[in-house]
Image (spheres, helix red, strand yellow):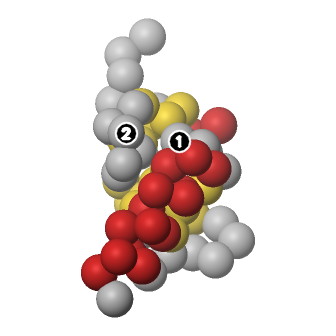
Amino acid sequence: MNKKKAKLQYKHNSFDVIEEGNFVVCAISGKEIPLENLNYWNVELQEAYFSPLEVKESYKKIKDKD
């Protein structure tokens, strides 16, 4: 199976597929996230996260900037 990175537009409770693919990349860890396992993202930043740990790290970075 060929893997291809997808391009998505993240919405509040869903996402739209802009370019077909099998996975996206976590904005924090760089881990590949299969689309069927994608549960965490930030609508404002348009970023995907592998797990709640990466979500926490992202919000910590945002808070530290303020």
Answer with the quarter of the image where residue 9 lies: bottom left
Residue at 29% x, 81% y is 65
Residue at 42% x, 79% y is 63
Q: Residue furthest front?
A: 64
Circle 2 SS class: loop
Say whether residue 17 is visible.
Answer: no
According to the picture, the residue beneath numbered tag 1 turns out to be: 50
**Mark toward the start of the polypeptide (2 vs 1):** 2
Report if the CB atoms under discs 2 and 1 are less than 8 Å apart. Answer: yes
Q: CA distance from mark 2 to mark 1?
A: 7 Å
28 and 3: which is toward the camera: 28
59 and 14: which is toward the camera: 59
Whether residue 60 is situated above or below residue 22 in the rendered picture:
below
According to the picture, the residue beneath numbered tag 2 turns out to be: 29
Circle 1 SS class: loop
53 and 14: which is toward the camera: 53
Amino acid at the residue labelled 2? Ser
Q: Quadrant of the N terminus?
A: top left
Amino acid at the residue labelled 1? Phe
Q: Residue furthest bottom?
A: 66
Q: Position of residue 21 (x, y in %)?
A: 41, 38
Residue at 46% x, 56% y is 57
Say whether residue 18 is visible.
Answer: yes
